[in-house]
Amino acid sequence: ALILGNLMTFFSFSFAQQSLLSAVSAVQFVSNVFLTWLLFGHRPRAREVLGTVVIVVATICIVRFSSGTSSTVSPEQLVEMYWRGRYRQVYVYFLYALFVLLVVYFGCRFSLSPLPIGLGCWRRIGATDLVVLNQAMLPAVVFVTLSALAGAQSVVHGKVLSLEVRYAIERHYDCASGWRTCLSYIGVVLVVGLFMATFWMLQLQRALSFFHSPFVIPLLQASWIFWTIVSGIITFEEFSDMPAVDIGGFVVSVVVLFLG
């Protein structure tokens, strides 16, 4: 069920704005509250009910402000934005630099590896280190932010991959620059996307084993939503045709969503 749900989420990004769908995915917290009550008999506290209401209201506002865009970008144009977008290269270089900085900071500050086995150059995190990591909020924030960078990029590659496959099928495998070039593009996106998604899944499991679940689960979701929204805005220029009022409302709604 988890794998099927993730696959459906990835493919859904080819039908709507990435910034919209990533924010709407926060409704899973609403379902978690009711399912926990229904299946395990855990009655939600007043704080949980309030947070649920805030999430629902913020999600409705996000959908409302996102519907204000008049963009008619075709799948072909979205793929072109990915490969030759005005801000794509600068944004990717920024992500690489931030990723390296977070790895170096985590390693130097705690003398531990924040990466899965085989990718780190510091000693592995042991049972005695978990007490140190959970004494402050900063280690979890750095670890989760580092992981969410890759998670957001896996969404971008998943969206581009589904768009390219759909475009190739609709064009009867007649890509603009030749079938071999089209296949090479799809292959690159597939390999990079699988690497990013695998890294994100491994980091999710490690985060749950390193840090307290009630704190790290919302932090993981919020970080993933934030970087996925930013990736969609920059890579696919999703705000280019959105009125300034709707952009402001969208940003405020996302902030309220995170508070919920």
Image: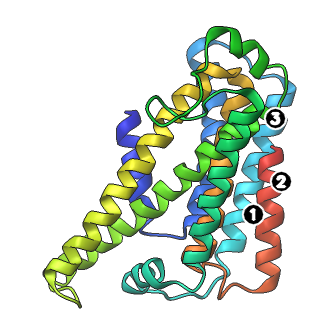
Where residue 24 appears, x then y in whole percent?
A: 62, 55
Q: Which residue is mark 2?
A: 256
Is tag 2's residue or tag 3's residue first in the polypeptide sequence? Answer: 3
The kind of residue on which mark 1 rests is Cys
Q: Quadrant of the N terminus?
A: top left
Closer to the camera in the image, 30 or 216: 216
Dot 3 crowding, Cα within 10 Å, few <14, some 14–19, many 20+: few
Q: CA distance from mark 3 to mark 1?
A: 31 Å
Where residue 170 appears, x then y in whole percent?
A: 21, 80
Closer to the camera in the image, 183 or 229: 183
Q: Are marks 1 and 2 in contact (CB under 8 Å)?
A: yes
Q: Which residue is mark 1?
A: 61
Going 71% across and 59% down the picture, which residue do you hit?
Answer: 60
The kind of residue on which mark 3 rests is Leu
Q: How is the image coloured?
A: rainbow
Mark 1 or mark 2, whichever is nearer to me: 2
Going 47% across and 37% down the picture, which residue do you hit?
Answer: 119
Is tag 1's residue or tag 2's residue first in the polypeptide sequence? Answer: 1
